[in-house]
Amino acid sequence: MPRDPLIGIVGKPSSGKSTTLNSLTDANAKMGAFPFTTIDPNRATGYLQIDCACARYGKEDLCKPNYGWCSKGKRHVPIELLDVAGLIPGASQGLGLGNKFLDDLRQADALIHVVDVSGTTDSNGKATRGYDPLQDIEWLQDEIRLWIEGNLQKRWGTIVRRHTATKSPIVETLRAQFGGYGANMNMIAKAVDSIPDLPPLEEWDNEWITKMVKAFMKVKFPTVLALNKIDHPDADKNVSKILLKYPDTRAVLTSAITEVFLRKLAKQNYIKYEEGTEFIDTLEDLGEESGLKPLDEKLMQRVENIRDLVLYRFGSTGVVQVLQEAAKVLDLVPIFTVRNIQTFTE
Ligand SMILES: Nc1nc2c(ncn2[C@@H]2O[C@H](COP(=O)(O)OP(=O)(O)OP(=O)(O)O)[C@@H](O)[C@H]2O)c(=O)[nH]1
Ligand SMILES: [Mg+2]
């Protein structure tokens, strides 16, 4: 079987990358209100929820997949998530933790860019107020592009000489260069085809190289924005600005910290919570037979706040939807294999 898809979680320090990872997986990555809490990447498995084929045949009770797991007709398909160190402006030139962790991202099939829309952290992840997160969206893409471009430009002379000597097609030459990012021939052909009037590679100047890398990034690292910290009062106006400026980007509103908290409460049997939904039930809602533990006043107040500020306003904490959006950009097609279509075994 080919490997599970890998999604890289990127963003500036303190935007909530590790919190997002923890909210989607059983990982326990360190989270902290100071930049560069994460240095070495954290990898964990999240589960994408899709409708399982068993439900179409009323075979939910028999469904015991070898791959992922199924509950009541909902298949949970494993997806690998990689939470890396924060990126800051100038990272491609080595600022912050620089290139090291960009290398960790090479094998990613898509990216989730976690943007802190509360405006409480500056571009370096330091605590502030009233920061405009709109700028983060652009410079982060630029840093990734400059990193790929830098790797290409270092060897450009040699690349062109070999390309000319071997009379290779452009896709072949680029395949050798972009192979390190796990790119296949199809992806490179798609990127090349997307650029109109592309001259022969020998004639490319820096502008053409930039165009090529941008096209390559679109294919190799399709990106979903997680507009995180929507529970913060300043988030609304920043979200509106971002959606207005980038109407075509895939963006999902999230409160990763809320999801982490709710999953924890559910695990400790204080609430019933269906991940990705707006529904939380407490002992008060469900009664003694639910087996739930009672919430003290403080916890009750927090749950009420979460209902008002996040769940009722936005419909959910958004993290499950982020994973679903990421799966969409990956163009994943689920295939349900069974040995026998009558008995649905294996
Ligand atoms: N209000 C609010 N705070 C959040 C949310 N998600 C994360 N935080 C807080 O933001 C801070 C940074 O979170 P992390 O998950 O450590 O951020 P990171 O992006 O992994 O940071 P680095 O590892 O330093 O790059 C922590 O204090 C979190 O509690 C959220 O949805 N809402
Ligand atoms: Mg982190």
Image: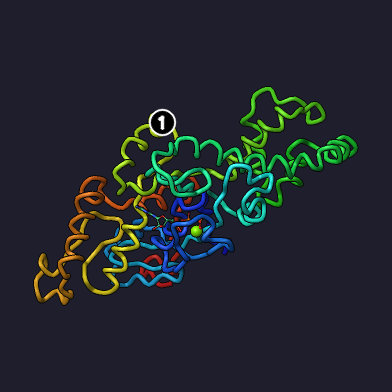
Which residue is identified by label 1?
Answer: 247
Residue that protrudes farthest toward the right in the picture: 165
Where, by quadrant of the figure, is residue 206 drawn?
A: top right
Report the side of 85 relative to 69 (left or right): right
At horizontal 58% and vertical 53% (from top left) the residue drawn is 108
The answer to whether residue 3 is visible is no
The answer to whether residue 258 is visible is yes
Q: Helix, strand, or loop for circle 1? A: loop
Tag 1: residue type? Pro
Dividing the image into 4 quarters, which one contains the C terminus? bottom left
At horizontal 28% and vertical 51% (from top left) the residue drawn is 316
Count neighbours of disc 1 (C-alpha within 10 A) and say few if under 14, some if 14 to 19, many if 20 or more.
Answer: few
Q: How is the image coloured?
A: rainbow
Dividing the image into 4 quarters, which one contains the N terminus? bottom right
Q: Residue 170: where, in percent of width, then height?
A: 76, 36
Residue nearest the viewer, comparing 297 with 129: 129
- Say if 165 sits above or below 293 in the image: above
Report the side of 268 relative to 152 (left or right): left
Q: Residue 189: where, in percent of width, then height?
A: 66, 38
Where, by quadrant of the figure, is residue 204 drawn?
A: top right
Q: Residue 112: where, in percent of width, then height?
A: 48, 49
- Say if 119 sits above or below 292 in the image: above
At horizontal 62% and vertical 55% (from top left) the residue drawn is 101
At horizontal 40% and vertical 45% (from top left) the residue drawn is 120
- Say if 59 sits above or below 248 in the image: below
